[in-house]
Image (spheres, helix red, strand yellow):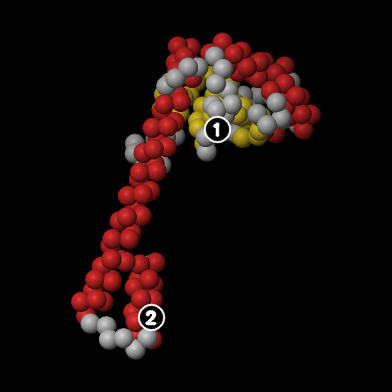
Amino acid sequence: MTAILLSLGWTIYFISRDQVVDTSTIIVGYFATAIILPLFSQIISIGQEVIEFNRISKILNNEPFDQLTKIGFSKTLTDRTSKYLSSNPKLYGTIDNYSVNIEMEKGVVRIIVGADLDLIEKSHMTELKRIFGKDNVEYDVGVALLYKPSRRKDLIFQDLNSELRQLTSFLRTNKIDPWDDNGNA
């Protein structure tokens, strides 16, 4: 649709300037805007997806996240219906019966522990922010711990595992039930 509007715009522009527009110019213009520009846009989009896929893979395949596979986590894709576009690698596992998804979004690793949001009170989030840092915890499909790889270069597996267990212990102690991937308590 955009290509058609752009083509019509060019045609109107030439006509309004009293320029003679031959048929070959119109055909080339329509061809460029209807085929070449959308194709170029798609190539740029696919390139960005490939770069993002590779960047996420690199982070999840390095310490400390690669060590999670040794304690039962498995690698999968965020969108299981597509193996290519809009599908990025993630890690999935369970800790103390809580489902844990590790994804990356906009340069931030999000470790999402599935918990019943109806049971999480403001006081719980205040305490979690005190424990893990105010910018490192947020609501999601449960509670998410946020890690910026550029700020946590010193993060090792033992620390990551300890923080995950500390979070699940907090949830269990406060009687916040785990949720599975389907949102069931």
Residue at x 32%, y 55% (from the top left corner): 40
Res 35 → quadrant: bottom left
**The N terminus lies in which quarter of the figure?**
bottom left
The tag on residue 54 is: none
Between the C-alphas of marks 2 and 1, the distance is 46 Å
Q: In this rendering, is residue 160 above or below 149?
A: above
* Residue holding disc 2: 13
Few, some or many C-alpha atoms within 10 Å of disc 2 (few <14, some 14-19, many ≥20)?
few
Q: In this rendering, is residue 109 above or below 1?
A: above
Residue at x 72%, y 21% (from the top left corner): 131
Closer to viewer: mark 2 or mark 1: 2
Outermost residue to the bottom? 18
Amino acid type of the residue tagged 1 in the rendering: Val
Amino acid type of the residue tagged 2 in the rendering: Tyr
Query: What secondary structure is found at the residue carrying circle 2?
Result: helix
Res 122 → quadrant: top right
Residue 155: x and y in percent read 56, 17
Q: Earlier in the sequence, mark 2 or mark 1?
A: 2
Residue 105: x and y in percent read 52, 36
The tag on residue 108 is: 1
Res 108 → quadrant: top right
